[in-house]
Amino acid sequence: MTSTEYRRFCSEMITSLVNEAQENHLHAVDERAWDSPFIGVARGDDPLFAEYKEIIGAVHWTPAEAFLLAYPESAVAAEELRVVSWVLPQTEATRADQRLETEFPAKRWIFSRHYGELFNEWLRIRVRDEFIRMGLKALAPTLLPFWAYRQTPQAGICSNWSERHAAYAAGLGTFGLSDGLITEAGKAVRVGSVIVAANIEVTPRRASSHTANCLFYARGTCGACIKRCPVAAISLAGHDKKACHNYIRQVTAPYAKQISGQEVTPCGLCQVRIPCEHRKPL
């Protein structure tokens, strides 16, 4: 395939899986978990991935580092790798329920966090395995046994591979005041990615900066997400990751277990009832 044909194949494959697979389901509610996805592709040697090691910390993998963990015997140059990233938008029904909440996540949102992310894991595996079936080497970074949450001086709580930062590199959105990714489908989304050794056409990043889609950073207006956080973990200074983490682990996670019976960590109140809920406001 040419690089453009590979790009078209990726888009059609992922879109078909999201829109047609029975696994894309909330289970506890008889409806789909996610709307139709957005797909982007970044080069494995994009300078951003080296910058992430400075911004997030040395523990954050470059695509080449993640690839070597999955294929330790394979010497593949970073420029031969591609990061295929996707955005899964929340449905209107899930967002509508979540808009009504001010302290705890809505039931649909809880089910989306659990069953929706299980689907996202299934999607990572299916996309990875489809590339492998084609004779290509591929991996899903967050499914590697070495993936874990870490603590760094630069970013505090973080992980070896950030799906949001991969999506930004792939031209799928920019960051907002709450650290959420503001995409063409807004901020009420989840994201996933795989790394593959293939010459796939890259998606250009058209944003003027890494915060270009956020009304607060672009125009000094909005700040609606500040009012949506029940523990003031968002302010004009940005996102207090520790306060956010503690609220989720100590308050919303136990609540979600009562509702769903599952070990799940939802909140997402700051992702709805804001101008960037389901669209790019600029």
Image (cartoon, rainbow, N blue to C red):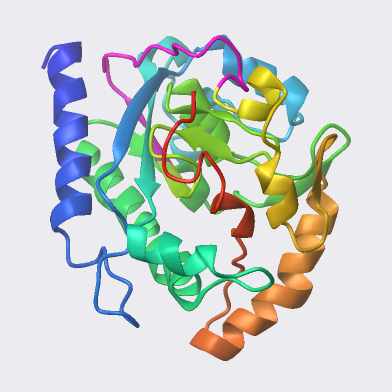
**Residue at 37% across, 14% down:** 80
* In magenta stretch: residue 207: yes
Q: Is residue 103 above or below residue 270?
A: below
> Residue 234: x, y in percent?
78, 46
32 lies left or right of 96: left
Please identify the dominant SS of the magenta region.
loop
**Residue at 26% across, 65% down:** 32
Query: From this viewpoint, which residue is outermost toward the front?
Result: 221
* Quarter of the rendering containing residue 243: bottom right
Q: Is residue 208 above or below residue 197?
A: above
**Residue at 85% across, 34% down:** 237
40 lies left or right of 127: right
> Residue 273: x, y in percent?
55, 53
Name the quadrant of the N terminus. top left
Q: 66 or 282: nearer the eye?
A: 282
Whether residue 273 is visible, yes or no, is yes
Q: Total label count?
A: 0
Q: 173 or 117: nearer the eye?
A: 173
Q: Is residue 176 above or below residue 169?
A: below
**Residue at 36% across, 38% down:** 86
Q: 270 or 28: nearer the eye?
A: 270
> Residue 141: x, y in percent?
49, 42
Span colored in magenta? 193-212
> Residue 30: x, y in percent?
24, 78
